[in-house]
Image (cartoon, grey):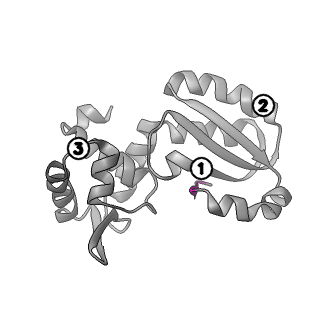
């Protein structure tokens, strides 16, 4: 879907990385290594996106970090397109509407860092039946061509294990 909208594969990778979880920030060499691209090719895309206001640049020490500009007027639309491309919206809608009383939901690990690894780790907090979660996830996995690994906790279990969650990359989605 995104390859029809954007012709640059590098730009698509950057949008997925930085707009899937807008709290993620990365610097040039880190992105270059992750995407297996030359820093020069990547810098051109980063400069274009930051010049247009889609990315914020922040200097820390000798590195310049880039992250999604959540104040940009197009941020909600770009973020929505990225989430739809990844299937996150569909996953959350299905989970919230079909499995019980969901209080919170988190993306964990790779997807929380904006990395499309093909494995979506999701933590669901509430009074939820794990069997129903697995039933809902199976058809979504086929549609998204990605494996979903759900974890279910009550709010009390989350409170007791909050330290563990805080150590893992996570992004609260509801």
Left or right of 99 on screen, residue 8: left
166 and 150: which is toward the camera: 166
To which quarter of the image does residue 115 belong?
A: top left
Q: Which residue is mark 3?
A: 37
Q: Which residue in the rendered view is the most extreme toward the bottom?
A: 61
Q: Secondary structure at mark 2?
A: helix
Residue that mark 2 sits on: 132
User: Relative to residue 119, is residue 44 drawn left or right?
Assistant: left
Residue 87 x/y as whole percent = 49, 36
Q: Which quarter of the image is occupied by the N terminus? A: top left
Q: Are marks 1 and 3 in contact (CB under 8 Å)?
A: no
Q: Residue at x 42, y 48 (%)?
A: 80
Which label sits on residue 57? none
Comes first in the chain, label 1 or label 3:
3
The magenta span reads 169-173
Of the two numbered discs 1 and 2 on the same chain, state the one appearing first in sequence.
1
**Mark 1, other Cα within 10 Å: few <14 / some 14–19 / many ≥20:** many
Q: Which residue is mark 1?
A: 108
Report the side of 155 relative to 94 (left or right): right
Estimate the x, y position of residue 46 in percent, counting from the top left: 21, 57
| CA distance for labels 3 and 2 | 42 Å
Residue 171 counted in the magenta span:
yes
Mark closer to the observer (3, 2): 3
Residue drawn at (14%, 52%), measured in percent from left and top? 40
Disc 3 vs disc 2: Cβ atoms closer than 8 Å?
no
| For residue 131, above or below residue 52 | above
Q: Marks 1 and 3: which is nearer the front?
A: 3
Determine whether the residue tagged by mark 1 lies in a helix, strand or loop. Answer: strand
Quadrant (top left/top right/bottom left/bottom right) for the C terminus: bottom right
| Residue 61 vertical placement versus 102 (above, below) | below
On whether residue 35 falls in the magenta region, the answer is no
Q: Residue at x 69, y 39 (%)?
A: 150
């Amino acid at each position: 879907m995104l390859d029809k909208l954007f012709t640059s594969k590098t730009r698509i990778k950057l949008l997925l990385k930085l707009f899937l979880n807008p709290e993620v920030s990365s610097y040039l060499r880190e992105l270059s290594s992750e995407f297996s691209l030359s820093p020069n090719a990547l810098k051109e895309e980063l400069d274009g996106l930051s010049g247009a206001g889609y990315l914020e640049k922040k200097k820390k020490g000798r590195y310049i970090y880039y992250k999604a500009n959540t104040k940009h007027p197009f941020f909600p639309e770009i973020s929505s397109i990225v989430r739809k491309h990844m299937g996150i919206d569909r996953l959350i809608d299905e989970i919230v509407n079909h499995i019980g009383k969901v209080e919170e939901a988190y993306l964990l690990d790779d997807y929380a860092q904006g990395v499309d690894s093909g494995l979506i780790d999701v933590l669901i907090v509430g009074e939820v039946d794990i069997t129903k979660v697995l039933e809902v996830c199976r058809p979504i996995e086929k549609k998204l061509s990605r494996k979903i690994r759900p974890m279910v906790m009550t709010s009390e279990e989350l409170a007791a294990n909050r330290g563990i969650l805080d150590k893992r990359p996570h992004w609260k989605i509801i």
